[in-house]
Image: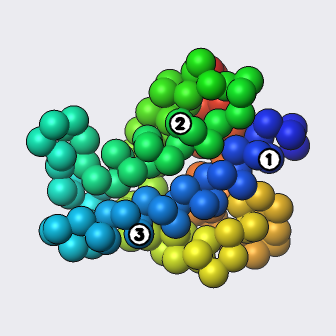
């Protein structure tokens, strides 16, 4: 695994935790879907907004100019292919052990592996 991808996956693990903590702190409570709690200014849901705000700064300098593209790509594909409840469960697991994504341990479940594959694909396409 490349150093760039390893750094991104480490940041992604932290990001996943932040996405739900920040969304849970919104005035409407915990989101119930990817499209819940749309921000009037940006038109983005709280989950997507939090993903984008955490994802873009977490990319290495090598990908800084493509950060918006990689982050939009990964969120779009996660939303299209991973049920929200599975994403929430992956977030809970990452909260218990954020190194799961970084180390790709045998305890990585199918959702976490799918997130890794999505991010790898978006980085490769950037």
Q: Which mark is residue 14?
A: none
Is 32 on the left or on the right of 101, as rendered? left
User: Marks 1/2: CA distance?
Assistant: 15 Å
Where 94 falls versus 124 (above or below)? Answer: below
As drawn, the residue found furthest toward the left would be: 40
Q: Point out the tag, 1 or 2, that comes first from the N-terminus.
A: 1
Q: Position of residue 16 (x, y in %)?
A: 52, 60
Q: Point out the tag, 2 or 3, that comes first from the N-terminus.
A: 3
| Quarter of the figure that contains the N terminus | top right
**SS at mark 3?**
helix
Q: Position of residue 59 (x, y in %)?
A: 65, 36
Where 113 falls versus 43 (above or below)? Answer: below
User: Marks 2/3: CA distance?
Assistant: 18 Å
Q: Which mark is residue 56?
A: 2
Q: Position of residue 126 (x, y in %)?
A: 62, 20
Residue toward you, 46 or 122:
46
Q: Position of residue 115 (x, y in %)?
A: 59, 52
Residue under label 1: 6
Residue under label 3: 21
As drawn, the residue found furthest toward the bottom would be: 96
Is 44 on the left or on the right of 73, as rendered? left
Residue at 69% across / 76% down in the picture? 97
Task: Tell me the crowding category of disc 2: few under 14, some 14 to 19, or many 20 or more residues within 10 angstroms, Cα based.
Answer: some
Task: Tell me the crowding category of disc 1: few under 14, some 14 to 19, or many 20 or more residues within 10 angstroms, Cα based.
Answer: some
**SS at mark 1?**
helix
Is 8 on the left or on the right of 67, as rendered? right
In this view, the mark in front (3 or 1): 3
In this view, the mark in front (1 or 2): 2
């Amino acid at each position: 695994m490349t150093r760039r991808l390893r750094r991104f996956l480490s940041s992604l693990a932290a990001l996943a935790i932040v996405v739900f903590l920040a969304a849970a702190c919104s005035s409407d409570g915990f989101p119930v879907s990817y499209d819940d709690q749309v921000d009037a200014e940006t038109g983005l849901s709280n989950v997507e907004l939090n993903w984008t705000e955490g994802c873009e700064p977490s990319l290495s300098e090598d990908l800084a100019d493509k950060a918006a593209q990689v982050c939009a790509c990964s969120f779009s594909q996660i939303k299209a292919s991973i049920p929200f409840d599975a994403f929430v469960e992956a977030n809970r697991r990452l909260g218990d052990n954020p190194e799961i994504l970084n180390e790709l341990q045998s305890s990585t479940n199918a959702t976490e592996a799918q997130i890794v594959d999505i991010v790898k694909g978006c980085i490769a396409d950037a």
